[in-house]
Image (cartoon, rainbow, N blue to C red):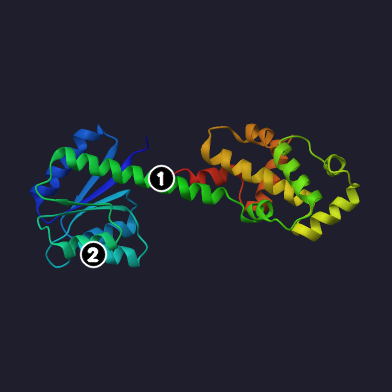
Amino acid sequence: MKEKKILIVDDEPRTREGLKRTLDKYSEGQFNIMTLGNAHDAIDFLQQQTVHLLITDIRMPKMTGLSLLNVLKEQEIEPMVIVISAYSEFSYAQEALQLGVTDYLLKPIGKQKLVESVEAALEKQEEQNKSKFMAKMVDDDLININAESSYSRSIKEAVHYIDEYYDEELTLKEVAHHVHLNPSYLSTLFKEEIQLSFTEYLTRVRLQHAKQLLLTTDKNVTEIAETVGYNTPKYFNKVFKEQENMTPSAYRKANENAL
């Protein structure tokens, strides 16, 4: 598990240090836990650094925890949030939930309850990150092509064949033979019906699978190139860069901290 950054914000030193001790002991070094005594310092900190989880008191001098959350929302700073409070007023809890907090804990906070709440928040974040990952890997045009019912039978069969055998040395001639058309006519159908050439469609299918492998496996670029149907990593790199404006390695590096 990658190190998780947690920020605790509470104007009571004893409370924030107690929370830190509990989580330090539980995490066995897997959490990097920082503490601050007021919301203004927290805003400055969060504008400079990304944290996975924010634990904040709701009532603090000068600026409340709810005001802090409103500022973060306006600035699109979106860690997971656990709110802690010595007060059980419904209005506080209601506003906190509207701001998207994952839990609302009343002081004094039991160690087990704190740990369970933190675990749940971080698990929820993992799920959200996985969803974002999947969104990055999705090619909306390919989804539309597969979902569209108005395409001719020949195009549907051709698309299905490409989706199944994209990892082989696939040619227009081979696909045309499979759907019982001559290559020239199938090429025309691709352009007319889905506004992509045969080669463009095949490339996008291969690159979608390549992106998935880059983000979810430890395979090197050469292995991925072969897996998705390219004979040489050099050509795979060239095609990938033309489509994504970065190399496969750069794409992986740009997304390596997303999970």
Residue indicated by mark 2? 95
| Left or right of residue 196, residue 240 in this image | left
Residue 231 location in percent, x, y?
A: 74, 34
Residue at 22% of width from left, 34% of height from top?
26
Residue indicated by mark 1? 127
Vertically, is 258 above or below 164? below
| Left or right of residue 77, residue 200 in this image | right
- Residue nearest the observer in this picture, 110 or 69: 110
Residue at 75% of width from left, 51% of height from top?
200
Vertically, is 46 above or below 259? below
Is residue 258 in view? no
Q: What residue type is labelled 2?
A: Glu
Q: What residue type is labelled 1?
A: Glu
To which quarter of the image does residue 77 belong? bottom left
Under circle 1, the secondary element is: helix
Residue at 79% of width from left, 39% of height from top?
170
